[in-house]
Amino acid sequence: MLDVRGLQKVYNGGARQVEAIRDLTFTLSAGELVCLVGPSGCGKTTLLKCIGGLLTPTSGEVLLQGRRVTGPPPGMAVVFQEYGRSLFPWLRVGENVELPLRQKGLPKARRRELVTEALAAVGLADAESAYPWQLSGGMQQRVAIARAVAFEPEVLLMDEPFAAVDAQTRADLEDLVRALWHKLGVTILFVTHDIDEAVYLGQRVLILSSSPTVVREELTIDLPDTRDQLHTRGDPRFTALRTHVQEQIQAAKRGLPSPSTAGDEEA
Amino acid sequence: MLDVRGLQKVYNGGARQVEAIRDLTFTLSAGELVCLVGPSGCGKTTLLKCIGGLLTPTSGEVLLQGRRVTGPPPGMAVVFQEYGRSLFPWLRVGENVELPLRQKGLPKARRRELVTEALAAVGLADAESAYPWQLSGGMQQRVAIARAVAFEPEVLLMDEPFAAVDAQTRADLEDLVRALWHKLGVTILFVTHDIDEAVYLGQRVLILSSSPTVVREELTIDLPDTRDQLHTRGDPRFTALRTHVQEQIQAAKRGLPSPSTAGDEEA
Amino acid sequence: ACGSSSPSTGTGGTNQVDNVKVGVIPIVDVAPIYLGKEKGFFSSRKLNLTLESGQGGAAIVPGVVSGQFQFGFSNVTSLMIAQTQGVPLKGVANGNASTGKDGEDFGAIVVKGDSPIQSAKDLAGKKVAVNTLKNIGDTSVRASVRKAGGDPSTVEFVEIAFAQMPAALDAGQVDAAWVVEPSLAAVKAAGGRIVASNFVDVAPDLTVALYFTSEKLMADNPDLVKRFQEAMRESLTYADGHPDEVRKILSTYTKIDAATMSTLVLPKWPAEPNRASLDELAKLGQQDGLFTKAPDLDKLLP
Amino acid sequence: MTLTERTSGGGPPAAPASGDGRPGRRRGATAWLGLAGLGTLLAVMEIVPRVGLVSPKYFPPTSRVAQALAGEVTDQAFWVALGDTLKGWALGLLIATVAGVVLGVLIAAVPVLREYTASTIEFLRPIPSVALIPLAVLLFGTDIRSTLLLVVYASFWQVLVQVLYGVQDVDPVADETARSYGLSALARVRYVLWPTALPYVMTGVRLAAAVALVLAITAELVIGAPGLGARIAVAQTSNAVPDMYALVTVTGLLGVLVNLGARAVERRTLAWHQSVRGEVAV
Amino acid sequence: MTRIARKVAAALALPVVLFAIWWLATENSANFYFPSLRVIVSSFGEVWTGDRLATDVLPSVLRLLCGYLAAVVIAVAAGVVIGSSSRVRAFAEPALEFLRAIPPPVLVPIIMLFAGIGDVMKIVVIVFGCVWPILLNTVEGVRAVDGVLLDTARSYGIGGAARLRHLVLRSASPQIFTGMRQALSLGIILMVISEMFAASNGLGFAIVQFQRSFAIPGMWSGILLLGLLGFLLSLVFRLVEGRALSWYHGLRRSQRS
Ligand SMILES: Nc1ncnc2c1ncn2[C@@H]1O[C@H](COP(=O)(O)OP(=O)(O)OP(=O)(O)O)[C@@H](O)[C@H]1O
Ligand SMILES: Nc1ncnc2c1ncn2[C@@H]1O[C@H](COP(=O)(O)OP(=O)(O)OP(=O)(O)O)[C@@H](O)[C@H]1O
Ligand SMILES: [Mg+2]
Ligand SMILES: [Mg+2]
């Protein structure tokens, strides 16, 4: 479904030249839910933008269903890390959610239905007629999520989508994402800094090294498919996995070589 | 030191009128470190802006050292939730950190020293000459933190300052905040969604109800003053406290009355 | 700031040279003053002349009133209008005059070569271009129409600068135009045809323009004014008698090309204004409603 | 300098505007494109009279104008006139810009001032500077100060209004940050308000530069103050059509130069701005 | 109610003071070109009532509105194209700057060659002058569209007309309105200039005519009328702007309540 092959991205900013990503290779099959974790500044956002066709890689390529991505592919939704700036300040919340649907050509009634549903799902049913800048940070972020959810994409890229919401809402939204994923069979790539979240949500977790970035480890989450906040998080396997991820990230941040990919890096 | 008395804030946005805060009363003594938690959209940012003198309360008042706050008081630093927009895009990272110091009238050498130290403390020593928009989300947020740290304020208000950084960096920054607090004796009000963080950092945790907001509970964190990531978080008392906070927030989000403040609300 | 204490006014002492600024329009009509300056008619009378070219009354009259210029050049109808409005102006010397020869004046009503208009009479109901409305142009064109037996009240006047008239005529934007040199030469070169000489139709040897000053300068420094008048008179007479030198001096302050220069019809430059013709012009002006009351020519003329 | 590189809407990757580390080459390409644009315009002006859309007598083709222009540039007086015009223009623009920026920031930063001056500004702005010509002559005659008066009056409003709108565009979060760090009013103007308004000011100055040029020439044309305008007036009244167009061409070229200068300044001062660092790919 | 009263008071305060100063300063004016304000005001009453409103003011205003609206449409359309592509901008900018620097008084004769001497010519002159501030501001506004918003639109496949309508134009609208505000007063100025050539009616024509016939109080009253007209149009403009940019003003105000 989604192939990232030898991806490299170098930012050229005058004097400052940053090799954000050195060499990333991995694959997502259709309908997979994969979480991406890595130290701050390691290039997760950059990677997502490359996959989303918003940024041209310096070398390497991204293939979506075998076709090379050169611009934003249809049927893909992105929730940006800068949620505040990704909402249109001149549109009300409802209109913000509706706009991509309109672009999709859905009939009015269906659009209304999707908008109402999505806003209700993120707990913002009564904010529909507010402007984004009248909302709190967490509410804005939830609007951005609602927009992506309503869009019913085939591929969903989310960049730290729950960073600004409280613990309880976060748990609810995590379940929302999994429910949606089950319902629509959408392929999801989910960036998060919350290790528990990554383990709880994903079928696999991709751990990135610090910049210049390579894949440090690909970890399959062998937890049962039906998860719930109480039992899954209580599962000893869950604890073992989260501890493993945490160790890997700590090592990554300190720049230690990872045993599993040290070889790959040379290749 | 800091008194918040009967604070109420109603936003009047045309047709939409929102009572963000109904009635908040609490006190911070000098040199205290208090964490503030509450459901998304309950008015934490609003409260911080009122304390910072950036927003005029609808009723009630904020007193700082006995004097009523009507504008931004000197010696106060705020780390905004919208970190991206709080950095000046026309200044380089170093200049962004330096600007408030310059305003304070510090000599050049001292300024350089503080800037370098603060950036090193948040792990951005080598980003000094980059523009903010050349940085990742987490890096931008750390710049905003560095700016507040370098300012050496008497009162520090932080609005979800670690929302965009990875778990490991977050832990390091938590320790940085506590170290700074010990070193400078600064009074800190810290908004967070991470319950563990609130319990780990604070001497007290203020739990807010959902909007229209009142103080649901004031919880004293009776953990030893020297905390460290491994042992403190392993402490059974820590677990008990975090569980208590979590329950309160869950209840707050569902709008259940809190036993401890139900009476206060009437008063 | 609008007083007349500008240093250039001079004190009237006979031994010192006075700086004099004259506001003129860079056209054929003012050739005598350029020529007179070159010939030294002004410097010999201790007048150090500076010629400032403006684009018409809008700039020159206020300049003279405020004392920025000591003298100015203007057509007589404008001066009459100014006088009836109470502008404190006074004519000091003749400007220029019509040649008085029908079909060979320096200004004329022209049409395109293939125009059905044959005489001024046919202008009735037509669109005629003049450089400014409610001024000497439309008054004199009406005189031509009237004289040819047409109804002047039906002529529709449009305001177009002389320079644009050949083009407007060519494009059929107007049916006829009152033009003066050098635009007249351009029209003729393009195959245009003269249907009337409107100045000639107003009065024989019509005085068209005057040099003027402010009443204030007249009162403050009569000697200066007198010397200017003498110099002007000499210049006018010289210019009238030396058309070749006039054509030569024209090339110094205009950009008329050589070919046109030789075919140019020059105006006449008599030393004194023709009072009878001005009376006639004043009468026509009043008839056309240019003035609210009759201009007092005795007061206006030198 | 672009740092946010993005792919274009589907076709080949958009030219990463000057972000490929070869700014010199990039600017060279820009210059060539600009010349091509000007060339196209001149070519149209050559063809239009040639094919008879308008008579070449009144709208001479470019080649004929070029001839006249060649005649002009060999004339000493032309250069004197050009110098006069440039002097009036530059001085007037400078005065207008400084006054517009200072007053604009002051008015915009103090809400009371803004409230109380709004109506007066709206009243004075549409008064055409050409209506001030008698006033200018009355005060200064054909002096360069007449030109200055008109130039300053006209271009001042261009800058002022842009500044007023630019100041309004300050990001509330950025401004609050500044306030919370106790930046003084002056420091906030210097570090927050000014950078935000700068793109607007740049546009204002570019607008004002052209308006100032227009007014300098108009004033010279109508009042007769020395300069290119006075030369145009002479050419007009003498029916010297190609010369007139040659001079008009010179004013146009001045406009192009002025804009080049403004763009260069902008590239330096607005390197951080979205408009300079990133390009919208269509 | 009191808020409105306060607004009106604020709007009138400074003009009243200035007029009072003018009145006092010219009370005994002997200067022909600066008649006393008393005379000007009384001539205002005589001149600008009845007939002239229909014969001079109305045609002028109609031409102004036509020209202005045409300029807005042309400038925004061109601005979007030019602002969206650095190549187009590099190509077109010098040529546009060339045209922009040509003063209307010398341009009018050229326009006359193509557009005749009627209303069309005058409207074209107004358009020609009004497009520049709108064009420049639109170009800059389009160039400054937020990168995150652009990415958002692209990733959701919002392209073409929708992108233009919902993103580019809306985002640039604060700056477009700045340009439109500038253009409005420029339009009035150009209305006057266009009526100085080949006109036989209009407000500008009347003012020039007064000036030429030395009816100086009439001329001043015409200038006053121009100011009033500008003020009225700007009031209307502000209403329109207030509606179109309500989100923007709300956003800017939101944190200052
Ligand atoms: N526009 C840009 N210009 C130059 N460098 C950039 C730009 N955007 C990102 N970078 C650099 O690329 C690197 C990776 O950035 P990116 O935003 O992808 O990190 P991230 O993994 O998303 O981090 P975070 O978790 O903090 O959001 C960083 O070092 C950053 O400084
Ligand atoms: N400018 C504004 N205009 C109108 N309403 C506003 C405005 N700012 C905030 N609000 C409303 O006030 C309430 C509280 O907002 P606030 O930003 O203080 O919440 P918060 O506790 O910081 O939430 P979060 O954790 O999501 O950041 C919300 O309901 C929000 O919609
Ligand atoms: Mg990121
Ligand atoms: Mg908040």
Image (cartoon, coloured by chain):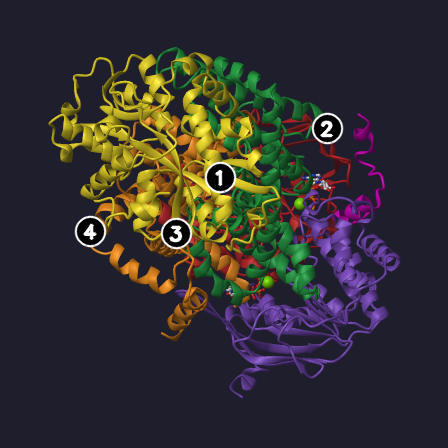
Chain colours: A red, B purple, C yellow, D green, E orange
Disc 4 marks a residue whose amino acid type is: Asp
Marked residue chain, label 3: C
Do the residues indicated by labels 1 and 4 lie within the same chain of the protein? no
Q: Which residue is mark 4?
A: E51
**Chain designation of label 2:** D
Q: Residue furthest bottom?
A: B267
Asked whether disc 4 touches disc 3, contact meaning CB atoms under 8 Å apart, the reply is no
Residue sitting at 42 percent across and 72 percent down?
E6
Q: Is mark 2 within 8 Å of ligand 1?
A: no
Q: Is label 3 in a helix, a strand or a loop?
A: loop
Q: CA distance from mark 1 to mark 4?
A: 46 Å
Numbered range of the magenta stretch:
A244-267
> Are circles 3 and 2 on residues that touch, CB within 8 Å?
no
| Direction from residue E123 to residue C235 in the image, left or right | right
Residue A245 included in the magenta stretch of the image: yes
- Residue that carries the numbered disc 1 in the rendered image: C228
Q: Is residue C134 magenta?
A: no
Which amino acid, mark 2? Gly
Ligand 3 picture quarter: top right
